[in-house]
Amino acid sequence: METLLTAAFPYVIGAVMLAGLLSLIIPILPGLWIMWISALVYGLVTGFDTAGIIIMVVITLLTVTGGFMDNLFMAGSSKRAGASWKSILAALLGALIGSFFWPPFGGLILAMVAIFLVELLRLNDWRQALQSTRSLAVGCGWGVVARFGFGVLVYGVWLLWVLVL
């Protein structure tokens, strides 16, 4: 029985990692962190040798970097559309509050409302405020793509750990 559990363990971890990867498409769950925790559990159960420690460090760096991608893309896209840093910070604060109180989409909605209102007050031009809001939404879309790409990298590095090292 123990052999069956030992043999099935990597498949269970792999399935949880795939679920985390798929959750990155619709940002309902913190998919990258689910993948990171899965890799950590794998390492704790199978043991961390030198290669395992290096792989876990790489997975950690990919997870942390991937977690910031949506913020970077949203801020960059909004800034290119002419939004002020004050508006971008208001959107970030709105995203944090909205994500905490109204998941899964409250963060995006409150970020868009915040950037629109601050830009409207700053410029007194609803069309330009709407353009900044659209740019924030486009940046969010690219952030989802980037986070998914980082998730694929995390999964690939973990597979390397399991299958090769």
Image (spheres, rainbow, N blue to C red):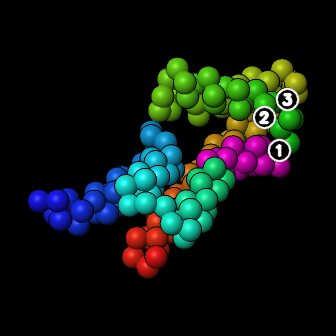
Residue type for callout 3: Lys
Region in magenta: 67-81
Residue 149 at x, y = what percent? 55, 62
Looking at the rendered structure, the secondary structure element under dot 1 is helix
Of the two numbered discs 3 and 1 on the same chain, state the one appearing first in sequence.
Answer: 1
| Image point (40%, 70%), residue name | 162
Q: Are marks 3 and 2 in contact (CB under 8 Å)?
A: yes
Q: Residues within 10 Å of mark 2 (few under 14, many from 20)?
A: many
Of the two numbered discs 1 and 2 on the same chain, state the one appearing first in sequence.
Answer: 1
Q: Say whether residue 37 is magenta.
A: no
Q: CA distance from mark 3 to mark 2?
A: 5 Å
Which residue is identified by label 2? Answer: 88
| Image point (78%, 49%), residue name | 76
Q: Nearer the viewer, residue 131 or 103?
A: 103
| Image point (50%, 23%), residue name | 102
Q: CA distance from mark 1 to mark 2?
A: 8 Å
Which residue is identified by label 1? Answer: 79
Which residue is identified by label 3? Answer: 86
Residue type for callout 1: Lys
Which disc number belongs to residue 65?
none
Q: Are marks 3 and 1 in contact (CB under 8 Å)?
A: no
